[in-house]
Amino acid sequence: MMSGSISSAVIFRLSRVAAGRLSSRTQSISTRYHVMAPAQSQSPAIVFSLADKKLSLCHPNRNGSASCRKYSAVASLICSACAHTYSNDQGTSDFVSQVTCPKCGALQKRCNKELPDYFKILGHIRSYRVDLQNVANKTKQLQKTFHPDLYSQKGSEQQTLSQEYSSLVNKALYTLLDPIARGRYMLTLAGLSPEDPDGDLEKTMTSDPEFLEEVMELNERLEEINSEPDWKEFRNQNEETLKEIHGELEKAFGKGDTKEAERLLGRMKYFDTLQHKLKDLQSRIGVVE
């Protein structure tokens, strides 16, 4: 087993690390830390410095020291407009800093081609519980930054990028504001591929006999509504059910229970569909609010 003292660093064991302290040269380029382990092991270790947020791959030497090579998530970029060279930490910087030159302000292509994190784009922690006001405020700021009118005289590339980022911000907003879309997106981030809305609803109903029976009963009640009091009673009950499911989803995602979250999203989709049917029914029976 590995033992040792660590200052501002986290050590990821590939297996075990050779005995001895890291060399003084290694300490000078990362942070102050040393690793102790059985002398017979010649396996490398990965060390993550909390101070400069960089990875070092350390290989043990025969004399008990270790030689390390440092890796960083900070990208070295060249502005496509002014050729300014600058560093950009794709892991910690905000979205605007990731896609704009710090010198001339020109928009840049995204370095990271992976699925964009809508939570990071809108400056929100990854959570099913969303601060809607903060998300709305952040969206307004980003929409001003990337508004296509600001780039209409700056060339086709800048116009294309402004449109791309404006669209990305709008998609992030829609996803985080809509409870069902937000849940589906979080399942995608967790490595799942949720089915289409009707698909997972059907799956939920057929796998849960009690829910299937509940759905049939509610559909019958909906067809029998022909007065304002009945309509309001049904609507209020449905809204309360949606609130309860929302709370259960917060708990499921908070615990990392993706299976339960997927089941609850199927239920939420059904009751959300009922809300739309109630709106159509409202105009037919003349409910005024």
Image: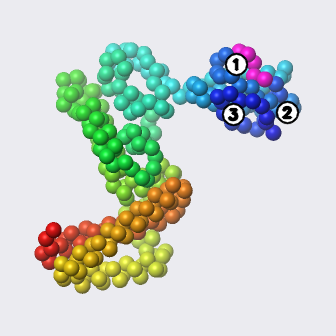
For the N terminus, the image quarter is: top right
Q: Nearer the viewer, residue 59 or 2?
A: 2
Asked if residue 57 shows in the view, the reply is no
Q: Provide the residue designation for mark 2.
A: 38
* Residue in view at x 18 percent, y 78 percent: 228
Quarter of the figure with residue 113: top left
Q: Provide the residue designation for mark 3.
A: 11
Asked if residue 9 shows in the view, the reply is yes
Name the residue type under label 3: Ile
Q: Nearer the viewer, residue 46 or 11?
A: 11
Q: Is residue 246 magenta?
A: no
Upstream in the sequence, badge 3 or badge 2? 3
Q: Nearer the viewer, residue 119 or 230?
A: 230
Task: Read off the magenta span.
Answer: 21-27
Counting from the top left corner in percent of width and height, residue 282 is at: 18, 73
For the C terminus, the image quarter is: bottom left
Q: CA distance from mark 3 to mark 2?
A: 16 Å
Name the residue type under label 2: Pro
**Which residue lies most toward the right here?**
40
* Residue in view at x 32 percent, y 68 percent: 239
Q: Name the image colouring.
A: rainbow
Counting from the top left corner in percent of width and height, residue 258 is at: 52, 59
Q: Residues within 10 Å of mark 2 (few under 14, many from 20)?
A: some
Name the residue type under label 1: Thr
* Residue in view at x 71 percent, y 29 percent: 6
